[in-house]
Image (tube, helix red, strand yellow):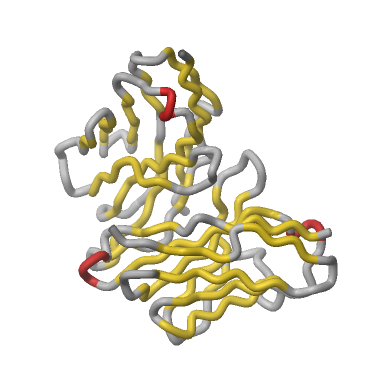
Amino acid sequence: GAVVSQHPSRVICKSGTSVKIECRSLDFQATTMFWYRQFPKQSLMLMATSNEGSKATYEQGVEKDKFLINHASLTLSTLTVTSAHPEDSSFYICSARGRREVRNTIYFGEGSWLTVV
Amino acid sequence: AQTVTQSQPEMSVQEAETVTLSCTYDTSESNYYLFWYKQPPSRQMILVIRQEAYKQQNATENRFSVNFQKAAKSFSLKISDSQLGDTAMYFCAFTHSYGGSQGNLIFGKGTKLSVKP
């Protein structure tokens, strides 16, 4: 089956620094990738949708200058948390949708734990 | 706006017994997909079962089956012969169908299921 890989699985960074999380589709071309944030004991909240080669579409309330999303290729999307603060600490998870042959299924990455100290 | 409601924050079931998780949704669209995802402590999102709205037949995957009531906008998950490994958060999710492809997933708040030995 299709596989989506996220890296790193866990990252600790200092307040004020930036951190990048990668989301890769390993065996299919991901035309669209979705980035979610999940707080403890809560559901997944969509942050943004990115289509290959175009700017990401952010959900209301998500700061696009703080959460930079790049989808430069059909197999890679990145989420960069800029000037991270402790309140950005959370679980971030991506998902990917492929071209026609896998278009009816969205595949999730393993998620990334971000801790800002 | 589309919404997904899971009215049971927590449920428990004895091993080998059957449990039903409830989900209702609200949409004005006619073409959409419904899903149940399982999220174990590892946080990996695992697709349990999927239902296309245009299909009247309820989806079934081994011990997992759904009761899809389109008019009532209800989509419950039945787990038969519950196993200890079924212990997890279960999320009901909805997405529109855009020419057969999926849009972003909208999640319910989740139901924490505990299977007791």
Residue at the spot x=33%, y=35% of the render?
Answer: B75
The image quadrant of residue A11 is bottom right
Left or right of A82 on screen, residue B28: left
Relative vertical location of residue B37 with respect to residue B29 in this rendering, above or below: above
Query: Residue at horizontal 74%, vertical 57%?
Result: A115
Q: Position of residue B78 (x, y in %)?
A: 32, 26
Q: How many marks?
A: 0
Lateral position of residue A101 relative to residue A42, left or right? left
Q: Quadrant of the C terminus of chain A?
A: bottom right
User: Residue A53, image x and y in percent?
Assistant: 44, 86
Quadrant occupied by the N terminus of chain A: bottom left
Q: Nearer the viewer, residue B112 or B72?
A: B112
Residue at 26% x, 60% y is A104
On screen, residue A25 above or below B7: below
Whether residue B7 sits left or right of residue A75 in the image: it is right
Would residue A103 be found to the left or right of residue A46 on screen? left
The one of B105 and B84 positioned closer to us in this rendering: B84
